[in-house]
Amino acid sequence: MAREPGSNDVRFPLRRQAEPESAPAPTPAPRPAPEAKPARDVRSWLPGRTAAPSPLELTGGLPPPERVAPVPEWRRAAPPPPPAPTPPPPPTADAAPAGYTSNLPVLVRRNPWKWVTRGIALCILLFVLAVAWLAVTAPLSKSLQPPAPPSITLLSAEGTPIARRGAVIGEPIDAAKLPAHVRDAFVAIEDRRFYGHWGVDPRGILRAFVHNVTSSGGSQGGSTITQQLAKNAFLTQERTATRKFQEVLIAFWLEAWLSKQEILSRYLSNVYFGDNVYGLRAASRHYFSAEPEDLNASQATLLAGLVQAPSRLAPTGNLKGARDRQKLVIGSMLDAGLITKAEAAAIRPAVLRVSRSKELPNGTYFADWVLPQARDRAGGVATEQTVKTTLEMPIQQAAERVVKSAGLRGLQVAMVAMRPDGRVVAMVGGRSYGQSPFNRATQARRQPGSTFKLFVYLAALRSGMTPDTMVDDSPVTIGEWSPTNSDGRYAGRITLRQAFAKSSNVVSARLTAKIGVGNVIRAARDLGISTPISNEASIALGTSTVSLLELTSAYAAIANGSYPVRPVGLSDDESADDWLAKRLGAATRFRGDEIDDLRSMLESVVAAGTGRSAALSIPAYGKTGTTQDNRDALFVGYAGGLVAGVWIGNDDNSPSPGLAGGGLPARIWRDFMTRALDLRAPPPPEPVEEVENAIDEGVTLDDVLNGLDGIMRGGPIETEIDPGDPRDPDGGYGSDRDPRDERRRGEDRDRRRDGGFE
């Protein structure tokens, strides 16, 4: 649309009108002189322009300003005095430059270092807050706690140390009381500027960094003694940036709250020296049998060198490496000016005087068994604890000596001895703990053989029988099972006591079928057998497995007169917190004459039955046991207030020809009891008891003839013998041969095992 000349273009208020290039610029009409100073042309700042070709119209779409008539000079008031000049305000980031009157963008320069300064200040503030938080919340006493797990020392009933589990932790030391050369040795090799820094040594960190970057001869660390204490006492051994930052914070905190001597004391009390030894006191005793206050320069420099790699440099296994490291410690002391050249040359290689005290003096198998209970009693502590056990050292030593001299010939052995109330006083879990720590007394589950007949005869007594009740010792078939006696001999009608003494298999099977398998299982459970028992008549011969410890506890119930007897390894004081279990499982007394009848039958086994090799000079009670193909042989019994069980066999359950419970196990039991009870040698054996009451009610002539036939062939009682090894000139396992074996050597050694058990 056309525009009239002289009119204002309100659509583009800031656009200058185009001028033709050929026509000269029109001369503007003269204007009246303004009352005020004209505004500065805003285009004059543009480069290359000296004067504005035409004024810039800023009216836009606003109405034009009203024209005001000039005031006559006679009506004008005197002008006010000019105000005092005020300094311009300082420029800010958002302020525009002076003379700026349009809405065009302006470039403003910003200061980049301002935010860096603010970030550094914020980091310092956070660091101070973190240190303050540690100072308030972190327990100072934690720096004295050892980094190792709790150490438990087991004591015998007499108070003698028998075993130690965990680290050997020495008592805290006072660095101020140590000789100067002891302190200087650790400071020189671990933190030469220990007395001059505030927990972190920047020079040491820089030195370690330069060495690690420029050298391939191994890495160096820049941690100070304070940082090592912070790591050992408060933190884990993981190598992360977070853990390192925590270490630095705690190091500053320790420096703020502890003196240098206190920090050094805590460090030397906690540091690891190898061989499972923590603390300078424990290390000096272990390696040199000396106290830290008595260490000479040679010993001190050797110990100071172990801190870098204690497991690798422990002198008991790497004496050369420890001495090489000792030379570096001496050189560091010389470089630091802590010793002179003459003193350095006078330090000789350290000579070890390792403590000869055994870590596990005795009772190794026992210690493994009782340790879980001891840890429960000790609780979650971080210091060394002593726990008193029930082990009696004289009895334990007697058991170890007897087993060592038994002549086992490759067979394994296990033995448990306890008091009638269940306090275990001795335990042997194998021939050698060093060769096999497997505890055959507590961990192995083997068939008990005829020792299980104790529960069969207890059930029979509960059913109303007595030791004099007549039973039938003749072949029998129960279902598809036909048990046989181990020696192939049958005595016909005999008493219950005689059947128990000769360990008749067929009588035990008949009793189980008559009184019921459930009653036999119930009797075993009452006496403390907890392992699975099969619900079949063959359990009468001991086909179910059981541990020797549990089986011995069952026989302890007979000696105690009440059941069940639970084996324990801790003294009454240590077990006092088990009061609830004691009240819930209170002991039960045997009914009527049951206990006397059981004891009389157990005595007959040793006096005139299969256990004659276990006879003592005092009354003894026990039962033999032999499993199928002579795989296991046992004897369990008691005398003089001591109950003991012995097992012999192979770990792979392979047969051992000639092995029987009345042979080597009974003799080991006898020798052990003789030593443990300090008894004299047993008297000569009495003549074998003949069949009593041969002519009695219900006894037929055939029964009498069967009994006489048994007597002519050696007697019905002598059925379990130890034929020994034909290649053995002594006639059996072991050197302590029973003289009575001589007259049985000519007997038939082919025992029938159809039914398989003694």
Image (cartoon, grey):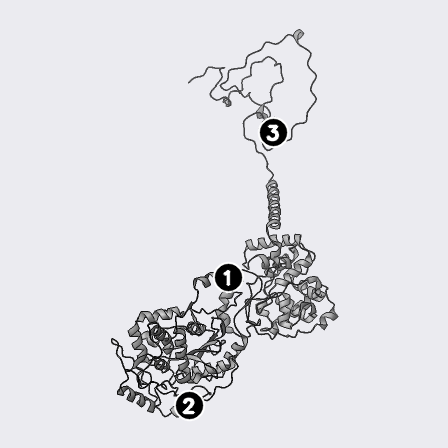
Task: Identify the residue under disc 3.
Answer: 97
Of the pair 608 and 570, the residue shown nearer to us: 608
Where's the C terminus, which quadrant?
bottom left
Select label 1 or label 3 by which is in front: 1
- Camera-side residue of 381 and 20: 381
Could you classify mark 2 by the number of other residues whose Cα lies within 10 Å: few (under 14), some (14-19), or many (20 or more)?
few
Say above or below: 582 vs 654. above
Residue under label 1: 577
Give me the C-alpha separation between circle 1 and circle 3: 87 Å
Residue 272's place in the image compared with 320, above or below, is above
Residue 251 placement (x, y as % from top left): 62, 54
Marks 2 and 3, how far apart at CA: 128 Å
Q: Secondary structure at mark 2?
A: helix
Relative to residue 715, is residue 419 drawn left or right?
A: right
Q: Quadrant of residue 387?
A: bottom right
Given the image, on which type of amino acid does mark 3 rest?
A: Pro
Q: Earlier in the sequence, mark 1 or mark 3?
A: 3
- The residue that appears at 34% across and 89% down in the rendered structure is 711
Q: Secondary structure at mark 1?
A: helix
The image's mark for residue 740 is: 2
Disc on the earlier residue, 1 or 2 = 1
Q: For mark 3, give the secondary structure.
A: loop
Q: Position of residue 309 (x, y in %)?
A: 59, 66
On-image quarter of the N terminus: top left
Q: CA distance from mark 1 to mark 2?
A: 51 Å
